[in-house]
Amino acid sequence: MQSQEELYGILNTNRLAHEQNDPSQHRTIVISISPQSRASLAAKYNMTPLQVHQRLVYFFKHHLGAHHVFDTSFSRDLSLVESAREFVERFRRYMANGGDKVEAALQQQDAEKQQEAEDGKRRPRARRKAAKAEDGEGGSVQQDMPMLASACPGWVCYAEKTHGAVIPHIAAAKSPQQMMGSLVKDYLATKTSTSPSAIYHVSVMPCYDKKLEASRPDFFMEQFNTREVDCVLTTGEIEKMFAEQNLQFDQLPEAEIDDMFNKVVVNPEMQMAFGTAGSSSGGYLEYIMRTAARELFNIHDVPADPAASPSNARVIVKTGKNADVKEYFLQGDDGRILLRFATAFGFRNIQNIVRKVKSGKCSYHYVEVMACPGGCVNGGGQLLNPNSEEVMSAKDWISRVESVYQTVPGVAPEENEVLKAIYNEWIGDPTSERAHKLLRTQYHAVTQNLGNPLATKW
């Protein structure tokens, strides 16, 4: 069902279990809040993201009776690290299996274009065809490149249902929501000696498709008959809960943040929420490029957010035909292009990328793919523009939510000391079977039954 009514039902069962002294019916309730949802609420109520988080802690813990309130910025660090590790693995495999020839051809093509631009000459078509032909020879290595982002369930479902050929390109690293699912139902359950089935895990997300992600069979723990994430509520559904509880959100007290899975610091000296540098869709492109530059090419001067550092010569950023398409080119010391990354937000832009991938003509190494134009801050579950069009357009409203999101300082995952300690205790060897089971997933082309559409396997 995945609705606020389902959560109310669990809360009511807990109250009855307490009154009847029946611990067997009691469940530990965990709430995980996305930074995009915080930004949407902060924009509407003119608060900082930290103030929103503290009020949500009060609402869920002290008013409703939840036990823990977590921040998916914390689990996103796990997703970023695992995504970067996977990209480096893929790139090395790609280069070892013919990708070096493809890259040499592309770099030669870049050099010719640069020379022709300086000479003012038009590029000969014969040269372009030759480069394409060599690219085609590397078709067998194209299962590894490009790697396509996997954090957006709308995009993943679209690929599974209509473009099975691109599935091998989708990153296997779990999304922040499902990383938190692993943390809650495995690490926290073990630490507290609680059965995963006795934990009810709710995530607050900007997107209705996150409900579909939570219900995927891959994220069902058969041994315990429970899902990693039991219920997904959108930002808008959370706001409806305030009204149902006869509460005004801006009048709620700010509660203390005292749980382990939070990327915040609250003490007498400082109160600050932290996030990740880069786009409001998670900063995947920026973090993976920075990590890959360091791991693959020993380059250490890539800025945390190249788009916000226009004077940096290491990464060239180009905006495409619309703001939802950007290209990022990592330059070596000799001027060669070493990595080609891009963003593609919105289905029109996604379709262009899919066509290139399926035809073997995509020269990017990584694409951050998001179904919603503008990325996750514009998710279908976010708060609608509370202003009239005369006061603020829908486009300006999304820009406001984006700007609020960007007020949270970015801290790299490797600087998250709490996460590092948990990872070493919980996972240990990142190449182990246990690491792959807890931190990665898989995708499946949908089998359609044209004779009986109701029998189609989703």
Image: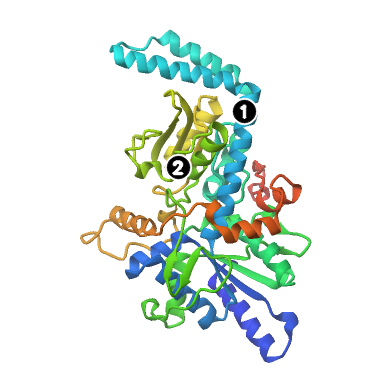
Which is nearer the eye, 179 or 295? Answer: 295
**Image quadrant in which you'd find residue 270:** bottom left
Residue 216, horizontal then vertical, whole percent: 65, 54
Residue sitting at 28 percent across and 55 percent down?
396
**10 Å neighbourhood of mark 1: few (<14), some, or many (≥20)?**
many
Which element carries disc 2, helix, strand or loop? helix
Residue sitting at 44 percent across and 57 percent down?
380
Amino acid at circle 2: Phe
Residue 220, horizontal then vertical, whole percent: 70, 58
Which element carries disc 1, helix, strand or loop? helix
Residue sitting at 43 percent across and 32 percent down?
329
Q: How are the residues colored?
A: rainbow
Which residue matches tag 1? 94
**Image quadrant in which you'd find residue 272:** bottom left
121 relative position to 132: left or right:
left
For residue 308, above or below residue 41: above
Which is nearer the eye, 225 or 149? Answer: 149
**10 Å neighbourhood of mark 2: few (<14), some, or many (≥20)?**
some
Asked if one can make out residue 293 in the rendered structure from this viewpoint, the answer is yes
Which residue matches tag 2? 347
For residue 67, above or below residue 230: below
Residue sitting at 41 percent across and 10 percent down?
125
Which is nearer the eye, 218 or 304? Answer: 304
Amino acid at circle 1: Tyr
